[in-house]
Image (tube, rainbow, N blue to C red):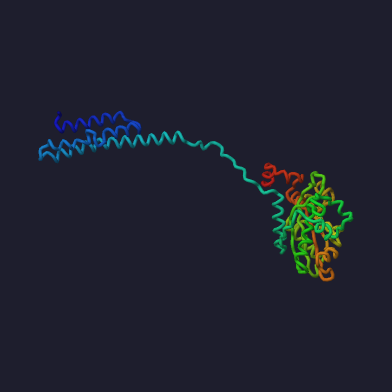
Amino acid sequence: MDDPKAQVAKAKEEALSALASANTVEELTAWKNTYLAKKSPLSQLMGLMRQIPAEEKAAFGKTVNDARQEVETAFEAKKEQADKAALEAKLKAESIDLTLPGRHYDVGKTNPYWLVVDEMSAIFASMGFSIVEGRDVETDHYNFELLNVPKDHPARDMQDTFYLGDQLLLRTQTSAAQAHTMLDSKDKAPIKMICPGKCYRRDDDDATHSHQFGQIEGLVVDKGISMADLKGTLERFVHQLFGEKRQIRLRSSYFPFTEPSVEVDVSCAKCGGKGCNICKGTGWIEILGAGEVHPNVLRMCGYDPEVYSGFAFGVGIERIAMLRYGIDDIRRIYTNDVRFLKDFQEK
Ligand code: DAH
């Protein structure tokens, strides 16, 4: 058996030479479990202390500790290197190629229909109108009779619709909300409301018509309401929506539920009134129907026409969207083609 000091040197040399050929994290772990384990020769060197004379014990202890220290330091250095190399390899293997184009997620875009509903609602709300929710399914009574359109009235021809039963139908006009609002308010004025909603008609679908479309109804009822109030309100509406430069023009017309009745035109934005393809050479574009609420309607809906008067109007939502955003075909509004919505949003 070698003397204790030689055993220390030998254990150290063996550990270091084994360490020299351990390079990977796995090899180093295996090495550690062998050479730094409790039962390894290096760990058991202190056991040799028994053979050492008392006066040399301290020096021997130091030799053992130094040897162990040296081996451990060598191990730590290699371990650090191996860890670093392993991390680098991992990062390289998992590296992200930042030059790849990103993945595009489509978020929905608001349809121009809803953009103008919001815009028009905000304009009327700023003038003190409340927003009423009507109903898509109506009775003949509310959709026609209370609006001064009795059973045999010729105006019904233009508003044929989808019947859900003898008296139940899909409303042809948001005007039905006029009758509901007046009857719900029961002789109380003022009424100042708009009602945006869907309407339905038996219509041939083409670039400017659809069997389903949107309208915004407006109704004001109070004492002393005149055509001047109607004109002022609609002028303000047009200025807010299309710009201060636009003018309006009232043309006499006919609706069963208003008297007098008018159609309202707005001066053409493209030609400024000179006449172009947009306004069909007239300089004006029709945007809505309106009038003073017919005395029969007021009476049937619980208001004395001798005391109250009012004005009403009905505006087509798609038509406004088309004019506001230069959309050439009403069907684009319904098909929800993302390319159209996107293109339109960018405008
Ligand atoms: N309801 C009419 C239509 O669908 C539009 C309309 C015209 C509504 C005149 C009104 C109005 O309130 O006063 O053709």
* Residue at the image point whose x is 75% and y is 46% from the top: 327
* Residue at the image point whose x is 20% and y is 36% from the top: 44
User: Residue 170: x percent and y percent?
Assistant: 78, 52
Q: Nearer the viewer, residue 298 or 114?
A: 298
Residue 190 placement: quadrant: bottom right
* Residue at the image point whose x is 86% and y is 53% from the top: 156
Would residue 39 appear left or right of 257 to someone viewing this image? left
**In the rendered image, the vertical position of residue 183 relative to residue 35, given as above or below:** below
User: Residue 152: x percent and y percent?
Assistant: 89, 55
- Residue placed farthest to the bottom in the image? 307
Would residue 4 appear left or right of 72 to someone viewing this image? left
Residue 153 placement: quadrant: bottom right
Residue 284 visible, this orientation: no
Would residue 221 appear left or right of 22 to someone viewing this image? right
* Residue at the image point whose x is 44% and y is 36% from the top: 91
Q: Nearer the viewer, residue 314 or 156?
A: 156
Would residue 317 appear left or right of 5 to someone viewing this image? right
User: Residue 321: x percent and y percent?
Assistant: 74, 50
User: Residue 293: x percent and y percent?
Assistant: 83, 63
Q: Quadrant of the N terminus?
A: top left
Residue 92 placement: quadrant: top left
Q: Nearer the viewer, residue 161 or 340?
A: 161
